[in-house]
Image (tube, rainbow, N blue to C red):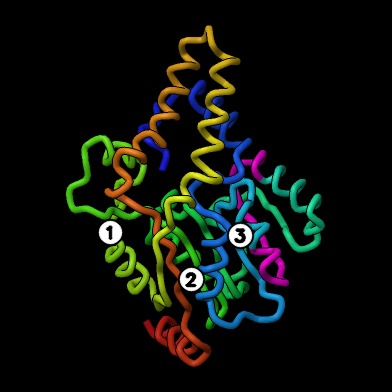
Amino acid sequence: MGGVIPPSTRFWELFFEIFESLPRQGPGNRACTARALGLCGELPPSPRVLDLGSGVGAQTLDLAELTSGIVVAVDRHPPFVERLRASSAARGLGHRVLPVVGDLAHPGVLPGSFDLVWSEGALYNVGLEKALETCRDALRPGGHLAFTDAVWCVEDPPTEVRASFEDYPTMGSTEDVRAAIAASGLALVGHFTLPDEAWWNDFYTPLLRRVEELRGEYGNDDEAIAVLDQIEEEPRMHRRHSGAYAYEFFVARRSSDSAFREEQHAAASA
């Protein structure tokens, strides 16, 4: 959720000055990551995991600690990738966490090469339909996809809330996402709503703290203060209208070997 973002270089400078310092760049926590991972059924002893839109990699590190596999983390913002590389090395995970600067829509991975594709709060950047296709193609037969997505909880959200999701014009309900998953050829395994603490503990609370620090640094800079006011409005709006929307964690599965071969045969005959 990014709000109504003006095409301002100064906005992006301050945006990244804040977001590069946060534990997470969106709602989530280790408990939710572990819960979604538990819905993925039996994984290979050392699964190959692809984390799309990893940010600084809070969930990437959790996945590396909760599994024994290799985690390839893709993000388009180089400072996020460099921070993840440093933090994974500091935690002794550098040999299993592989941060890469890349494009979510075209991550450059071999088809069918991952046991698990993961993405928390990032798929909307390339459009859910396209993102689901990309994730599905990266999965081996029987592999799992786990992702979070913003969803509407009411049919007619307040105007200010709808405006805050202007960068996600196709945002729908939980049922809309379920339908998109089915249309992509994946089978839904389960889903759950992120709890309130997943918004505040590692995301909004550190964000507000960082905004206050920067207010002290830019106290005489009216343009900077206006940008900080805009960024601070997102958590304030969440306090007012959190019942209108949510983040939902979805887990889906690609077809097994036999069904996968049928898909390939059908595609070749088309």
- CA gap between label 2 and label 1 equals 21 Å
**In front of the other: 109 or 60:** 60
Report the amino acid beneath label 1.
Answer: Ser
Circle 1 sits in a helix, a strand or a loop, which is it? loop
Residue 43 horizontal side relative to residue 240, left or right:
right
Q: Residue 173 carries which label?
A: 1
Q: Residue 80 got which mark?
A: none
**In the image, 216: left or right of 66?**
left
Residue 108: which numbered mark, if any? 3
Magenta part of the protein: which range?
A: 63-80
Task: Specify few, some or many for label 3: CA neighbours under 10 Å numbering under 14, 14-19, or 20 or more.
Answer: few
The answer to which quarter of the image holds residue 159 is top left
Mark sitting earlier along the chain (1/3): 3
Q: Position of residue 198 (x, y in %)?
A: 49, 52
Residue type (three-letter) at the residue carrying disc 3: Gly
Pair 2/1: label in front: 1
| Residue behind mark 2 | 136
Q: How crowded is mark 1: few (under 14 residues within 10 Å), some or many (20 or more)?
A: some
